[in-house]
Amino acid sequence: MAASCIAASELLHNIKLIPYHKASCVLIRRISTSKLKCSSQPVAEATSAPQQLVGVVGLEIHAQISSNTKLFSGSSVQFLAPPNSLVSFFDASLPGTLPVLNRRCVEAAVMTGLALNCTINKKSLFDRKHYFYADLPAGYQITQQRRPVAVDGVLTYSFLGGKKRNQVIRKNVHIKQIQLEQDSGKSLHDDANNQTLIDLNRAGVGLMELVMEPDMSGGEEAAAAVRELQLILQALGTCQGNMSEGQLRVDANVSVHRAGEPLGVRTEVKNINSIRFLAKAIDFEIQRQTDVVQRGGTVKNETRAYDSKSGETVPMRDKEGLQDYRFMPEPNLPPLIVFEDNASLPAGIDACQAVVVQTIKEGLPELPGIKRDRLVQAYGILPEHSFTLVNEDGLMEYFEAVMRATKMEPRKVIGWVTNELVGLLKQQNTSVSHSPVTPAALAELLELQEAGHISSSVAKQVFQEMWRSPGKTGAEIIREQDLGLVSDAAKLHRVCQKVVDSHPDEVCAIRSGNKKVLNRLMGLVQKELKGRADPVLVREILQEKTS
């Protein structure tokens, strides 16, 4: 043993007995070879590459409830109102003022919970969350820490993956809870005069905070989940979801770890106000933390912000010390009670005065995921087209209105809507509701094309003119500009003969068996006639002259 390369205790790292077939065992020894220096018989080192670090993402989303008034006061809710013009005594936290719960906000939270497959708590509680900030005049926020209005939900979201981005990938993210709470005011920092101004118009506006479990692994998944939630909230009418106006604000909790190991230290990226920026911020943060861990460093538990100009997250404040919010029950609000159905209402309570879960459930609209599935099944369109129709506000309704007014195949109509219409909408930076071409006008144009009165290229030309001249129909433009299809056989023969005579090389190629060259000659004929030639007749004539 003295002549051994290394002590047996250093060689023997671990010993296991693993079952082998039915009646035998295999003795497995894991050998550490880091100190072996034998030259007589080299030992082959078996190493396995360390598992790759993967991202883990959870989200906290604040959705501003669509309501005319605030959560606990009668002050109006309005974006870009003059500073401090929508502030009640309660919003300013003047002594002696008491909260009065807004029923509309409760109904919105219950409806959102039902749409996200949550359990609705028939009894929920309000709490005070204490922290000091200049735009929080009371020194605390009224929220639902102990028992929120809805818990244990699931959001099913989809996105397009695969090499060609045409494969629908469906995933779920669990919703831990949905709670009602007040928004704070807004601090306006005046660096030039070294002062901060406070606008309390937003103070007390009703929010739903949705807490998503860390079930996502990257920016693309998180962005798809938030976009799906945004569409659901808009379909429900519980939140307008306009991120540029702060109606939907996202905080992302990001960490990295190796599969099978405990989750790593997380950082929180605050107040991301764009779905595109959300994906970029998360992907950057995952890569940043991966680089830190791979260099042997330690990820800090901190709050960060996303800088859209640099495309990076930057530190805001340290979170190593656990902040004590001193939660306590809100003494001025009784428990919030909602009822399962009218039969469960206590005697003497009017159903119109109560929040009834069954009534809200019966009023749920068609949700985005169901819309997409229905479009694919009803019209036979591709899944990626259903995403375009549903994700663009008003586009699905436009498409279905065109379909009701035309006999053209859905797959042809979808091309017009997603290519021609959406292309011009993006070019003009406008919405479907402001399109100068109505669904009925587009349907009329498509019917003219289907009937053979105009070619497809002319139809697109007419559509462009209809866009520039609102109110003019396709038929009027075709008549004014003489764009109707040329079906005069004698005229077509003359033009085709001219093209054939001037392109002898193409004619030889066709006669040698290269039939594809015929398409080039057809294009030249269409060019001569400004796209108005009947393509069926042109093909027949050219085939005859080149045979």
Image (cartoon, rainbow, N blue to C red):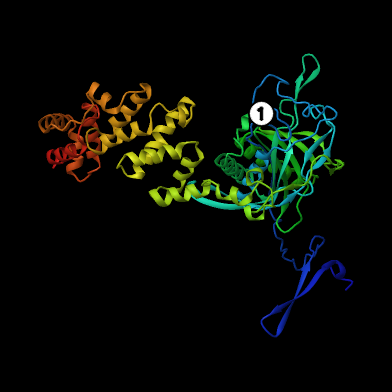
Residue 86 drawn at (x, y percent): 71, 24
The answer to whether one can see residue 375 in this image is yes
Hey, what amino acid is under mark 1? Val
Looking at the image, which is closer to me, 250 or 19?
250
The quarter in which the N terminus is drawn is bottom right
Q: Residue at x 48, y 27 (%)?
A: 430
Residue 208 drawn at (x, y percent): 69, 41
Q: Residue at x 64, y 42 (%)?
A: 108
- Find residue 470 and report its image quarter: top left
**What secondary structure is found at the residue carrying circle 1?**
loop
Looking at the image, which is closer to me, 164 or 480?
480
| Horizontal arrangement in the rendering, residue 471 relative to residue 526 (left or right) | right
The quarter in which the C terminus is drawn is top left
Residue 218 drawn at (x, y percent): 64, 46
Residue named by callout 1: 77
The answer to whether one can see residue 161 in this image is no
Q: Residues within 10 Å of mark 1 (few under 14, many from 20)?
A: many
Residue lying at the far bottom of the rendered structure = 23
Residue 513 drawn at (x, y percent): 20, 46
Looking at the image, which is closer to me, 453 or 168?
453
